[in-house]
Image (cartoon, rainbow, N blue to C red):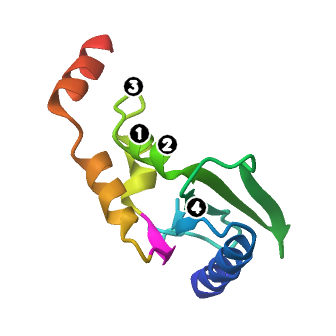
Amino acid sequence: MDHERRMALARRVTEYVLRRHPDLIAVAVHGSTAKSEDREHSDLEMFAVTRCRTETRGYGTIHEGIVVEIELVSEEDAMREAGTVTGKWPMAADGWIHTIPTHDPEHILPRLAALASHPDPEKLARSAAVR
């Protein structure tokens, strides 16, 4: 599957999740597809931000041989996770920074990217000291 078809699939996944979660405020593609580094058999990795926590953690399927995964995260959890600096930073921040929005009427994705790319200097120093 090429990049254009994978992105069309991402838009269909977005519509599917929107129909099932009316409190959805943002949906994005991340991983290799968001960086246009996807190959024929690359996974399609997505996340969706909901207004409140939901019991549904996400959805996954295989479509035309492609693994499709979408994780659901509350707005509160997304803000906390994007601003968290751990031993996995900056790799963990990449998923918040390099995204392709498929639904973001409230423009939350740029705020998440800003939190991830500009962590609190004290948190960053503490994380570096732990290593």
Tell me if residue 66 comes above or below residue 118 in the rendering. Answer: below
Give the SS element for disc 2. helix
**Could you tell which of marks 3 and 2 lies nearer the N-terminus?**
2
- Give the x, y percent position of residue 91: 41, 42
- Callouts 1 and 4 close, C-beta under 8 Å: no
Three-letter amino acid code at the position of disc 1: Arg
Per the rendering, the mark at residue 64 is: none
Magenta span covers which residues?
Answer: 99-104
**Could you tell which of marks 4 and 3 lies nearer the N-terminus?**
4
Of residue 9 and residue 2, the one placed in the foreground of this image is: 9
* Label 2 sits on residue: 77
Of residue 65 and residue 117, the one placed in the foreground of this image is: 117
Residue at 58%, 59% (x, y): give it. 47
Residue at 26%, 20% (x, y): give it. 128
* Label 4 sits on residue: 48
Per the rendering, the mark at residue 80 is: 1
Three-letter amino acid code at the position of disc 4: Ala
Q: Main secondary structure of the magenta part?
A: strand
| Residue 30 in view (yes/no) | yes
**Could you tell which of marks 1 and 4 lies nearer the N-terminus?**
4
* Label 3 sits on residue: 87
Foreground label between 4 and 3: 4
Specify whether residue 101 is painted magenta.
yes
Specify whether residue 28 is painted magenta.
no
